[in-house]
Amino acid sequence: MEIKYNNEKVVFHSLVSLKDAAIMLNAPDIDSLEVIYTFNEINLLRVKAYKAESDPLYMSWQFDQTSEAEQAWRSKVEEIKARYPFPA
């Protein structure tokens, strides 16, 4: 993961929390950091989010087969994709 702060990129070779990164960079808060994830990191974040958030909704939809349950699942998948977009 790379973190951009004050127009400088810093590479972290292991995932650290944004709070820890802000402390290491003497940043005032995490909102002043721009996080740039690699493709693999984004994929891992998506997989974790799918398992925790969208998979239960998918199973609910499979159980009751309502359009509302399907839409809840599809909306959650889109939300996760928007939260963790792949790099261009």
Image (spheres, helix red, strand yellow):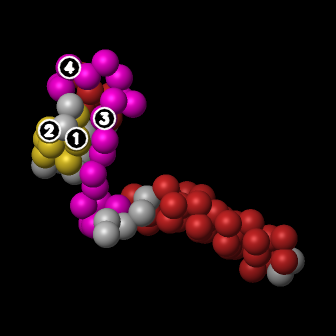
**Residue to which mark 4 is pinned:** 26
In this rendering, which labeled residue sits more in front, label 4 or label 1? 1
Query: Tag 3: Cα neighbours inside 10 Å, few (<14), some, or many (≥20)?
Result: many
The mark total stands at 4
Residue 34 x, y percent position in the rendering: 31, 41
Q: Is residue 2 left or right of residue 29?
A: left
- Of the numbered discs in the image, which one, if any, rests on residue 8? 2
Nearer-N-terminus badge (4/3): 4
Identity of the amino acid at label 4? Asn
* Image quadrant in which you'd find residue 54: bottom right
**Residues under numbered marks 2 and 1 in contact, where contact means CB atoms less than 8 Å apart:** yes
Which residue bears the numbered disc 1?
A: 4
Image position of 62 with respect to 40: above or below: below
Q: Are marks 3 and 1 in contact (CB under 8 Å)?
A: yes
Residue 60 appears anywhere in the view: no
Q: Tag 1 or tag 3, which sits nearer the N-term?
A: 1
Start and end of the magenta stretch?
24-43
Return the residue at label 3.
33
The amino acid at mark 2 is Glu
Earlier residue among tags 3 and 2: 2
Amino acid at dot 3: Leu
Residue name at image x 67 percent, y 72 percent = 74
User: Dot 2: within a 10 Å radius of its alpha carbon, few (fewer than 14), some, or many (20 or more) residues?
Assistant: few
